[in-house]
Image (cartoon, rainbow, N blue to C red):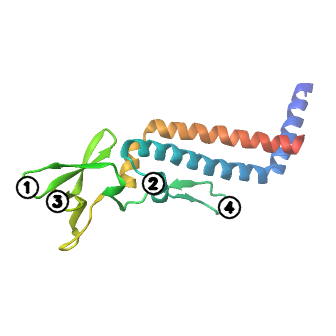
Amino acid sequence: MAASDLIEQRGLAEAIQAIGALKGEIVRAARGSVGTTATATRRRLVVLAMAQTGLRRALLNSRTPIRRSNRPGDYRAQIRPSQKGIPVPDYRWTHQPTGHPARHRILIDWPGGKKVAAGFVNPFGQYQAPLTTRLKGHDLAVALGPSAAALLSILFSDADLGKSAQALQNDFLKRLETAVDRRTG
């Protein structure tokens, strides 16, 4: 047996022992980095959505909660956007004439341009609010635009997935280095 083989074997045994001692720190680093990455990804998407639609940050954050796992051994965090429609007045919106004199179509700001929202505006009405009749029969209600899920599905791309994966890896390695430095030095 060569001297270099003996050194490698000792180094391997010490590394396995050190990793065993760091198991709790590894678990905390993994769970923390997954949560931090999910929060950063949502923040990036919310800022992009705010710029393109005029929606408020608080509304988008409430409609895109992050679901973090608390079970041992489960290191997942999911951004779960709501599929409930967002009221049109929360978007930047305008209206334009259609063929009917008492009804205008609703246009909201959307990634890539304008999007037609379900509903109408009475241009002769006192408030000219975006309305709909389909929610409550014949009673008028505020028109709903697309949901947060529809918006984020348009904004999230493969490039975002790659950025998130890289951020997760970098954050985990930084947390792990911090844990090792704290343990060894």
Nearer mark to the viewer, of 2 and 1? 1
The span from disc 4 to disc 3 (Cα, nearest Å) is 56 Å
How many residues crowd mark 2 within 10 Å: few (<14), some (14–19), many (20+)?
many
Image position, residue 150 (x, y; %): 35, 52
Q: Nearer the viewer, residue 73 or 91?
A: 91
Residue labelled with disc 1: 101
Mark 1 crowd level (few <14, some 14–19, many ≥20, 10 Å Cα): few
Say whether disc 2 or disc 4 marks the residue closer to the N-terminus. 2
Q: Which amino acid type is shown beneath numbered disc 4? A: Pro
> Which residue is located at x 77 percent, y 50 percent?
25
* Of pointers 2 and 1, the one earlier in the residue sequence: 2
| Three-letter code, disc 1 | Pro
Check residue 122 in the rendering and tell me which mark sits there, or answer none.
Answer: 3
Q: Amino acid at mark 3?
A: Asn
Q: Real-space Cα distance between discs 3 and 2?
A: 28 Å
Residue 60: image tag = 2
Q: Is residue 144 left or right of residue 134?
A: right
Residue 58 pos. (x, y %)? 49, 56
Q: Amino acid at mark 2?
A: Leu
Q: Nearer the viewer, residue 149 or 26?
A: 149
Of tags 1 and 4, the one toward the viewer is: 1
Q: Mark 1 vs mark 4: which is more N-terminal? A: 4
Q: Residue at x 46, y 35 (%)?
A: 159
